[in-house]
Amino acid sequence: MSLLTPQAAVRSLAALALALLLAVPANAATAVDRHVVIVNHTHHALVQFYASNQDVDSWQEDILGEDTLDPGERVRINIDDGTGHCIYDFKAVFDDGDVLIRRKINVCKVGTYTYDE
């Protein structure tokens, strides 16, 4: 059984601390907040809302589900799909049949997204 000298123990702890510090930026990048407040400032209810990261060729599930977002209302949505993406396309469907598609929304930087007429 060999024991580390005090100098070797300090070097080992320093190397471990450095390795942990280098690992933090990778973990911090995936911990970005992807919550966006969707605001409906139109005269029509928002009946469906989709957010798909830019690398997906189809719309994901309707985030609102059975709910609607009436004029003047807002809802906070977690856009994170687990892929680590920040750039998403939004699709909003209103009760009058209008469909609005907005591309390349950076959900890591945008805290609120408003639909206006």
Image: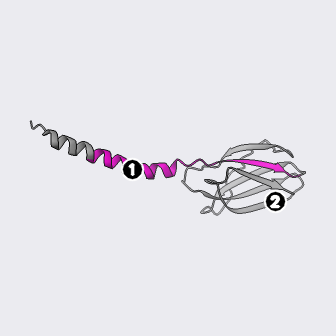
Using the numbered discs, state the Cα–Cα distance from disc 1 to disc 2 in whole angstroms.
43 Å
- Left or right, 89 with respect to 12, comes to right
The residue located at (78%, 53%) in the rendering is 114
Mark 1 vs mark 2: which is more N-terminal?
A: 1
> Which of the image's four quarters has the C terminus?
bottom right
Rendered location of residue 32, percent (x, y): 55, 49
- Left or right, 90 with respect to 22, comes to right
Amino acid type at image mark 1 = Ala
Kindly indicate the quadrant of the structure image that contains residue 1: top left
Nearest to the observer: residue 32 or residue 63? 32
Rendered location of residue 17, percent (x, y): 31, 45
Residue at disc 1, secondary structure: helix
Nearest to the observer: residue 12 or residue 34? 12
Amino acid type at image mark 2 = Val
Nearest to the observer: residue 19 or residue 101? 19
* Marker count (numbered): 2
Q: Is residue 100 above or below residue 28?
A: below
Nearest to the observer: residue 113 or residue 49? 113
Residue position for label 2: 99
Magenta span contains residue 25:
yes
Magenta span contains residue 112:
no
Q: Are marks 1 and 2 in contact (CB under 8 Å)?
A: no
Residue position for label 1: 23
- Left or right, 99 with respect to 63, comes to right
Indicate the colouring scheme. Answer: one colour
Residue 114 badge = none
Kindly indicate the quadrant of the structure image that contains residue 51: bottom right
Rendered location of residue 93, percent (x, y): 81, 55
The residue located at (25%, 42%) in the rendering is 13
Residue extent of the magenta highlight: 15-42
Residue at disc 2, secondary structure: strand
The residue located at (79%, 41%) in the rendering is 67
